[in-house]
Image (tube, grey):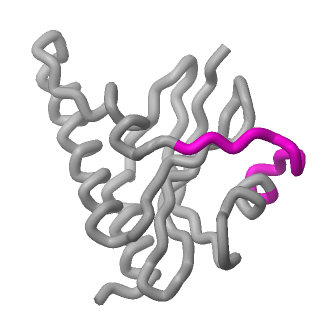
Amino acid sequence: MKTDEQILAELGVASAGLLFMSESEYPFEVVRVEEAGEPAGALRRLSGAASDEPVVTQSVEDFFRVAASEAEWRTPAERVEAKRYQALIALLRENLKEVMAYRVGSINIQVFLIGLSASGSWLGLSTRVVET
């Protein structure tokens, strides 16, 4: 069984250099949420959002649907990047339970791709998406 530090290190390596594209491009950062229970409140605090800011969940597969697609219209470089996103999804699923994408806010949305580690910590990645 991997430690939290090992999982975070692997996620850092797997996401290094990836920029998530929306109306802007943002990198990924590793994140640990050590508060027990449902993470919505802690994620609002981490993102600096108001306590009534919406937190919407979706599967990591849905969140990465376009980025992980190897559609024929994509360039060879984009297909290589899609494989990196597929590997990132697999890494999250293999090492964490209850993995979800938590979208905090609206327009400039902080996204947490987190799940529970064996130690009970919420671990994963964070990025931003801009949707106007």
Q: Residue at x 40, y 46 (%)?
A: 60
Q: Is residue 42 left or right of residue 120?
A: right
Q: Is residue 33 left or right of residue 52?
A: left
Q: Nearer the viewer, residue 65 or 11?
A: 65
Q: Residue at x 42, y 45 (%)?
A: 59
The total of numbered circles placed on residues is 0
Q: Residue at x 81, y 58 (%)?
A: 45
Q: Residue at x 66, y 74 (%)?
A: 37
Q: Is residue 48 magenta?
A: yes
Q: Please tell me whether residue 46 is drawn above or below residue 28 in the rendered image.
A: below
Q: Please tell me whether residue 38 is drawn above or below residue 111 in the rendered image.
A: below
Q: Position of residue 50 (x, y in %)?
A: 89, 46
Q: Is residue 11 left or right of residue 71?
A: right
Q: Position of residue 87 (x, y in %)?
A: 22, 52
Instruction: Give the quarter of the figure containing the N terminus.
Output: bottom left
Instruction: Give the quarter of the figure containing the C terminus.
Output: top right
Q: Is residue 11 magenta?
A: no
Q: Please tell me whether residue 52 is drawn above or below residue 114 in the rendered image.
A: above
Q: Position of residue 72 (x, y in %)?
A: 10, 14
What is the span of residues highlighted in magenta in the rendered image? Answer: 45-57
Q: Nearer the viewer, residue 49 or 14?
A: 49
Snapshot quadrant of residue 83: top left
Looking at this view, name the residue that lies furthest to the top: 73
